[in-house]
Amino acid sequence: MSGKVSGTAPARAVRHYVQREVSSTVHGSGSLDLERYSEPPGDPGLFGPDSVTWRVHADAPGMLMGGFASLMLQSLHPLAMAGVDQHSDFRQDPVRRLNRTVAYVVSTTFGGTAVAEAAIAHVRDRVHPHINGIAPDGRPYSAEDPHLLTWVHIAEVRCFLAGYERFGAPPLTPAERDRYFRETAEPARRLGARDVPQSAAEVAQYLHDMRPELRITEAAIEGIHFIRTFGANPQERAATRVLMNGAAALLPDWAREPLRLGRSDAARLLVDRPLAQAAGRALRWAMEPSLIVAAAYGRMGLTPPGRR
C-alpha cells in the first residue's frame, strides 16, 4: 500500500503543477468565476451537453493547438492581420490577448444563456466598433465587416476541429462534423458574420474560394515569429515550440509554405507530430475535465465524460 501511495503522490503533484501553469497562462491569474458556468440550473446555454461543440471544446490539447493554428491561418488575410497588428497589444502582453480570446470561446460554449449572450454583445457592441483603419496596402478594414467575421470564425472552428481529431480524441462521424459547423455558426451569426458555412463540405469550398484573398504580410510573419518564440524561460519556450509545431501540422498544406514555418515534411511527420501527440496526451491527463467543463455539466445535473 505504501508503494502505491508513494507512486501516486508524485503523479498528483505533477498533475496539479500542469493544471496550475496551463490554467494561469490560458485563463489568467484571477478567479475562474465558476458561477458563470454552474448557474442557473438546467440552462443549456447556446449548445448544451448533447452538442458536438461541448465535446470538441472540452478537449484541452485540441483547443490549445487548434487555437494556435487558427491564429496562423487567420493571419493570412491581410485585412484581418492589419486589425490585429494595429489594434492588439499582443507584443506587449500576449498572454492578456490569449486570456480574452479564451474567455470569449469558453463563455459562449459553456456559459449559461445570459453569460453567452453577454459575451457576444460585449464583443459585437463594445469591442469591434473601435477596430478599424487602413491596411498597409491602402484598403480600409473594419472588425464589423461580415466578410472578415466569417473568415475569422471559419479559420477558428476548422482548426479547433482538426486539433480535436488529430491529437488523440475519438474521431467524429461525417454527420457529427457537419453538426459541429452548424452549431458553431449560430454565435458567429450573432456576432455579425454572414453566409457562414455549416458543413464540412461547405467549409472546404469556402477555404478554396478564399485563397485568392490570402497572402502573407510582414505583420503576419512578425506575429507568428513572436508567438513561436514566446516564453519567460527556456522550458516555456520549448513547450511553446512543441505546441506551435503541432499546430502547424493542423494547417492546410497550402497555408504552411507562405507562413515560412521552416519545417520539412519529414520533420513534421517524424518529430513534430509525435511530440505534439505526447504533449496532447499529457494535457488531456492533467487538464480534463476542466473546472469550467465540470461546472457546466453540473449545471445540467450531469457529470462530465470520463477522462480519455
Image (tube, rainbow, N blue to C red):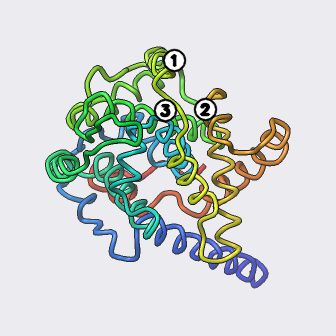
Residue placed at 64% from the left, 52% from the top? 244
Residue identified by numbered label 3: 158
Residue identified by numbered label 2: 255
Q: Viewed as shown, does residue 264 lie left or right of 196?
A: right
Q: Nearer the viewer, residue 180 or 86?
A: 86
Q: Is residue 206 above or below residue 216?
A: above
Q: Which structural element holds mark 3?
A: helix
Q: Earlier in the sequence, mark 1 or mark 3?
A: 3
Residue identified by numbered label 1: 208
Verify CB contact (< 8 Å) between mark 1 and mark 3.
Answer: no
Q: Viewed as shown, does residue 239 lie left or right of 48?
A: right
Q: Which structural element holds mark 1?
A: helix
- Which quarter of the image is occupied by the N terminus? bottom right
- For badge 3, the amino acid type reads Arg
Q: Earlier in the sequence, mark 1 or mark 2?
A: 1
User: Based on the displayed image, in which of its 4 quarters is residue 29 positioned?
Assistant: bottom left
- For badge 1, the amino acid type reads His
- For badge 2, the amino acid type reads Ala
